[in-house]
Amino acid sequence: MDVNIVGKGAVGEELMALMQMRKFTLDTLRIFASPGSKGQALQTPFGSITIEDLADVYPQTQNQDGITGKLLEGYTFFCAGGDTSKQYAKLASQSSIVIDNSSAFRYDSDIPLVIPEINAHAIGSSKLIANPNCTTAIASIPLYLLHNLYGLKRVSIATYQSASGAGGKGMDELLLQQEKVATNLGAGQERYTGISPQVFPHQLIDNVIPRIDVISNDGYTKEEMKVDWELHKILNLHSIVKIGCTAVRVPVLRAHSEAIDVETARPVNLDEYRSALLHASGVTLSDDIERHIYPMPLTASNKYDVFVGRIRPTHTFDNGVTFFVSGDQLWKGAALNALQIAEYIRDHKE
Amino acid sequence: MDVNIVGKGAVGEELMALMQMRKFTLDTLRIFASPGSKGQALQTPFGSITIEDLADVYPQTQNQDGITGKLLEGYTFFCAGGDTSKQYAKLASQSSIVIDNSSAFRYDSDIPLVIPEINAHAIGSSKLIANPNCTTAIASIPLYLLHNLYGLKRVSIATYQSASGAGGKGMDELLLQQEKVATNLGAGQERYTGISPQVFPHQLIDNVIPRIDVISNDGYTKEEMKVDWELHKILNLHSIVKIGCTAVRVPVLRAHSEAIDVETARPVNLDEYRSALLHASGVTLSDDIERHIYPMPLTASNKYDVFVGRIRPTHTFDNGVTFFVSGDQLWKGAALNALQIAEYIRDHKE
């Protein structure tokens, strides 16, 4: 199996770690990054890899001297942001199966947006598959089970998103602020002296920031709209199902959490819903509040499954359920789901 | 003016700081705490005060030798938890006006539960007034304005509650964990070595904990039910108005935040609602997402007002609004509101 990874950030790194853990057999691994990194050696679980530039495979201008790099084969994971995906993902899909982590193609009606536990069938014969937004992916399986059993009507979500959502540089910024506060303390200085946020719009330590991503329509952020658009697409929901979201960054290193309040078309039997969660792939029931067992980012980090708990009748709606989820943003929220898409195609299509 | 404070924790401390800031004129200040602290000198903004024991004012048993301490006069603030309030607050209200910070009397139909900006009139001739739960207090004014304009139907709340909600010891535990992580880093040890939570049920640094307070009915925590019960009482809401809440502790030092999604009976005019917020007491409009201006716990700390922003049409309901609030948990969420009740009585009743 040939694998190509575009981007050498946190998602690309986690993808390689997961390929090793899940014994995703590789013949060759190629890594592509920005022209400035070309030729550098990157240490990976699969040995040292020399970074390539996609512009050598796909000429950027008519004047450029044709293809100099070897065409991509096997599976290509785009983990480098929307602009890179827009430029190269369709080209790469002519000779390899492309799984795109960006939002570039998620809303195109002819590109499948896939959570394998839910809609693997949507892959069909597509060579370009979009991987959902992290917040969407983490909420999707518990909502899918609920929809199958009782029909979704309204979903109100508030998120608790970790620094890892902004990649390695987001995690680094939180770590740096934690270190700075400790240094200030030791030096007898004011707690926040010298903290100057670069990645997040405000200081994250001791704070929460209720804006993630750019502004979209209606006063909503794009992060909030992604949850609405993508859940509709993945769960194939009728447009009358209404989904509202408030996306908030919290000072947590990795793993996102979400408080989810749902109105269903039919009354929810909580035991039946718990049982569905218990037997479903991709989720772990973590629901014993008396014994202080509930989903938390700390326990959901570096886990394949999304944790679901605090399951109780909604007090907002006549029918429905309120619950809490935590899932690893870099895994089910990104690299793991992307790899699961590739595994599904490997096992079912080849 | 005579003032008595029962409890020498974070709320009592903030109360004294606020009395000084707001020039709440004192003739005498008495401080009561547990028997073990009796006779100790406490440094306050009003000089050194010798701590007294309420058991010396109110004999605890028939056999005890009657009253030895001077009766309470003026205003008494109970800031020491529900058990102390249950034991002494009604006795204290025979000779002083009692403002109780605990939940001991909040749900008694004959005890007013008051946010002065909303229902000061409910004080009437009562000598015992209950101060609302912090999460309720912080949400109350924006919801009150909305109710007056458009009528509340359904309210779905997810909270981001700071360590200060567990008092000084909660803040200390978060600070200790931040220090521990830094020390571990310096010593080359694993990040969380030696962290052992005492106040919160789990580690709070790099985590969120979706359980606050004991379990109530239905799988809800008491913290979540307080918001429902208390908003109904303060806003005098019909029981058909439905309020659901998920209460979550986040690694923030002080100031609580809440994502609030509301269905209203009539369509919301957002400009009209913003204008109402702009002109109301107790709230500051902080609503310019393009310029990264929105409520945050860091900017709401040590502020009298609750900050309201991220105001936009709800995507969950047909009519309504979604918004975000941050307010100082120790101030409007506790000591400030208690003091404002006393100020109101001083200015209107005497």
Image: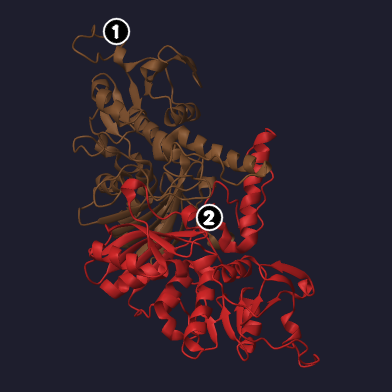
Chain colours: A brown, B red
Is disc 2 surrounded by few (<14), some (14 to 19) or many (20+) residues within 10 Å?
Answer: many
Mark linked to residue B209: 2
Toward which corner of the image does residue B57 lie, by quadrant? bottom right
Q: Position of residue B28 (x, y in %)?
A: 67, 80
Compared across the picture, whether A167 is left or right of A192 comes to left
Q: Is residue A147 above or below residue A223?
A: below
* A162 shown above or below B327: above
A339 with respect to B152 (left or right): right
State yes or no: discs 1 and 2 in contact (Cβ < 8 Å): no
**Which quadrant holds the N terminus of chain A?**
top left
Residue type for callout 2: Ile
Q: Report the chain holding disc 2.
A: B
**Residue A236, image x, y percentages:** 24, 47
Label 1 marks a residue whose chain is A
Q: Residue at x 20, y 37 (%)?
A: A108
Tell me, yes or no, whether dots 1 and 2 are on the same chain: no
Q: Distance between the Cα atoms at labels 1 and 2?
A: 53 Å
Q: Identify the residue at image location x=46%, y=15%.
A: A49
The residue tagged 1 is A68
* Element assignment for label 2: loop
Residue occupying image coordinates x 45% and y 69%? B136
- Quarter of the rendering containing residue A316: bottom left
**In this rendering, would B157 be left or right of B198?**
left
The amino acid type, in three-letter code, at marker 1 is Thr
| Mark 1 surroundings: few (<14), some (14-19) or many (≥20) residues within 10 A | few
Q: Residue B159: horizontal and vertical position, in percent? A: 45, 60
Does the image show residue B192? no
The percent coordinates of residue A95 (x first, y second) are 26, 18
Residue B14 vs residue A233, the one in the foreground: B14
The front one of B65 and A4 is B65
Q: Quadrant of the C terminus of chain A?
A: top left
